[in-house]
Image (tube, rainbow, N blue to C red):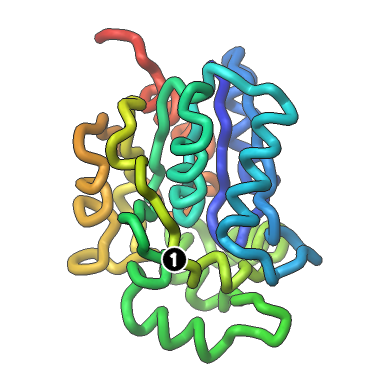
Amino acid sequence: MNFLLIHGSWHDGSAWQFVAEHLRQQGHQVFTPTVAGHGKGADLRVSHSDCVDSIVDYVRDHDLENLVALGHSWGGTILQRLAEIEAKRLNRIIFHNAFILNDGEALFDLVPPHYQKLWKEIETDDGGIPLPFPIFREAFIGDLSSHDAERYFQQFVSPTPARSHYDKVILKDFHRLPIPKSWLYATDDIALPPGEYGWHPRLSQRLGEYRLVTLPGSHEVLFSAPCALAQAIILAGSNESI
């Protein structure tokens, strides 16, 4: 299979390196672009549309086809727009503990009020929202030791562009697309608190018909269990009849 992996907030394409290695070892092609405005030293004033354009351009520049495209967390909102724009290039789309917007929504609309308040308080003058380490440690990566959490935080975490999270996204066609969909769910993820604001089924049910694949792990299972995540991605991405 040809996998396109779209990272979430506070990360860049390098965050997929461990998962991509396992997928490539099994003979799959893997593409891990960095979305505009992400990564250390990036321009943080980009819009959501700028972020989408960067991935659409990547797909077109590399002439990628027959893709299984995955969006993780905020990357799900980028995947939705990619699916609208380049539907013919996509065999299946996978939402991995991802935000799924309705037409005219922003990601900001879907997070709990305490996150909304915090983001406004810590937003920086250059247009970024940093991720405080205590939140990363407790809510994002509770399935690794504090030492490993600190190591991954230092290597892979950087501020995310605020505007790309505040922008309302127009999605006129997504919910009518016939592309097969999967929801890949790391069951121990509390980056969104379970219950009223949880990932599943609150957001997954917006897909309509979908395949459900689960695995144990936190929001950062791409670091804590990359081999298991790679196997789950293969299962979620297959269009073969069982």
Residue 97 coordinates in the image, percent (x, y): 38, 49
- Residue at (46%, 36%) from the top-left corner? 83
Return the x and y of residue 27 as percentages of the image width and height. Answer: 61, 13
State whether residue 36 is above or below residue 234: below
Furthest residue to the front?
172
- Along the line of sight, the residue nearer the viewer: 232 or 107: 107
Q: Secondary structure at mark 1?
A: loop
Residue 23 x/y as whole percent: 57, 24
Looking at the image, which residue sits at the far top? 241
| 98, above or below 208, in the image | below
Q: Amino acid at mark 1?
A: Lys
Q: Which x, y percent locates residue 8?
A: 54, 54
Instruction: Give the quadrant of residue 161.
Output: bottom right
Q: Residue at x 58, y 49 (%)?
A: 52
Give the residue drawn at x 69%, y 36%.
58
Q: Residue at x 69, y 71 (%)?
A: 45
Tell me: 17 left or right of 234.
right
User: Residue tagged by mark 1?
Assistant: 168
Q: Quadrant of the C terminus?
A: top left
Would residue 136 appear left or right of 102 to someone viewing this image?
right
Q: Residue 19 appears in which quarter of the rendering? A: top right
For residue 177, above or below residue 47: above
Compared with 116, 175 (above or below) is above
